[in-house]
């Protein structure tokens, strides 16, 4: 598909953005969806709204971003509240194109950093943020939104990792402008500790057995489900075990000097990579 990212400005644009959210979040999505009046207020208050059309003959969107105007540590910032791609457009470059356009538009307006919350059990979002965009994860927060009944969140506590994407950092420039691979791609597996023990099942999913941190490793892998949404639909209790079982290890690591810097996919399994490093070094400074 041809991917053209454009700013969402008209009421028709905003209505298409609302419809996309309702597709993504399902019938019980009222608490999770930004409706047209809310989207209009975001635009009026300096937010950034971007979309990708499903085709030239339709007003429907294949993907969208809604960012709120903000500041962070004295810098101009955006907070990425909505990021979604329709099921049929996934794995076709829509998400990457949206993030790259978000960076371009933000820089034109003098924005230094884009922040977001990301579910650390979602491997695709983590891959895009850490491996492709150059963002880092800094802190872990439990149940940020409380209980939600929409199709993306039902049955799981809404734990999130705080994301910082510094748009001009050497880390981001290396990935997006110089085409260099993420730094962890050069790290061998034996140089990392694995904090999780899992087992394969006949269903094709991996179940979490236990969590154990080994001291002395600067880089730690925490396994996560390859597709937490599919797992939750087929085995809700096991999805909840993944949330409860990884929560404390993420909190402990992110609270003791580690940062989330990569998503490793190896042998059909997905791992969050955390490194004990200060933020400046993680962003490529010095």
Image: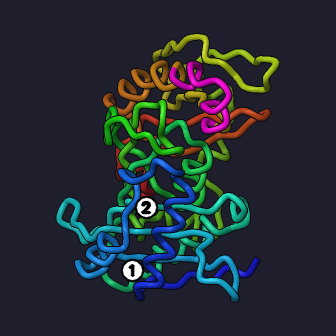
Residue located at (61% from left, 38% from top): 229
Query: Dividing the image into 4 quarters, which one contains the N terminus?
Result: bottom right
Seen from the viewer's position, the closer of residues 157 and 25 is 25
Indicate left or right for 114 with 100 as reference: left
Find the residue positioned furthest to the right: 202
| Image coords of residue 33 (percent x, y) | 40, 58
Specify the quadrant of the image occupied by residue 78: bottom left
Q: Is residue 82 above or below residue 215?
A: below
Q: Earlier in the sequence, mark 1 or mark 2?
A: 2
User: In which image quadrant can residue 35 be found?
Assistant: bottom left
Q: Is residue 160 above or below residue 48?
A: above
> Dominant secondary structure of the magenta stretch?
helix
Residue 248 shown left or right of residue 84 in the figure: left
Find residue 247 and report its horizontal and vertical position in percent.
Answer: 42, 25
On the image, the x and y values in percent for residue 282 come to 43, 49
Note whether residue 193 is visible.
no
Residue bounds of the magenta highlight: 228-240
Residue 82 numbered tag: 2
Relative depth, front residue between 84 and 80: 84
| 272 sits to left or right of 162 | right
In terms of secondary structure, where does tag 1 sit?
A: helix
Q: Residue at x 56, y 11 (%)?
A: 210
> What residue sits 69% from the left and 88% below the top?
56
Under circle 2, the secondary element is strand
Kindly identify which numbered label has been placed on residue 107. Answer: 1
- As drawn, the residue found furthest toward the front would be 27
Does the CB distance between marks 1 and 2 fall below 8 Å? no
């Amino acid at each position: 598909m041809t991917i053209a990212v454009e700013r969402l400005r008209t009421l028709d644009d905003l209505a298409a953005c609302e419809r996309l959210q309702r597709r993504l979040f399902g019938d019980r999505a009222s608490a999770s969806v930004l409706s047209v009046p809310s989207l209009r207020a975001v635009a009026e208050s300096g937010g950034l709204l971007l979309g990708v059309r499903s085709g030239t003959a339709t007003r429907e969107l294949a993907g969208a971003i809604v960012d709120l105007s903000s500041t962070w540590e004295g810098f101009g910032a955006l907070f990425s509240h909505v990021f979604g791609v329709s099921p049929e457009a996934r794995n076709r470059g829509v998400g990457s194109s949206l993030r790259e356009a978000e960076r371009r538009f933000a820089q034109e307006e003098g924005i230094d950093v884009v922040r977001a919350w990301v579910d650390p059990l979602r491997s695709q979002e983590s891959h895009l943020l850490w491996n492709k965009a150059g963002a880092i994860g800094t802190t872990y927060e439990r149940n940020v939104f409380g209980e939600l009944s929409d199709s993306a969140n039902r049955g799981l506590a809404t734990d999130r990792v705080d994301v910082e994407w510094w748009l001009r950092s050497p880390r981001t420039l290396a990935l997006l402008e110089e085409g260099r691979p993420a730094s962890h791609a050069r790290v061998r597996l034996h140089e990392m500790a694995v904090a999780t023990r899992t087992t394969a099942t006949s269903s094709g999913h991996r179940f979490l057995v236990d969590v154990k941190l080994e001291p002395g490793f600067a880089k730690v892998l925490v396994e996560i489900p390859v597709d937490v949404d599919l797992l939750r639909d087929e085995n809700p209790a096991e999805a909840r075990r993944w949330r409860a079982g990884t929560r404390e290890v993420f909190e402990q690591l992110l609270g003791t000097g580690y940062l989330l810097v990569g998503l490793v996919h190896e042998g059909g399994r997905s791992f969050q990579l955390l490194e004990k490093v200060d933020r400046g070094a993680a962003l490529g400074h010095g």
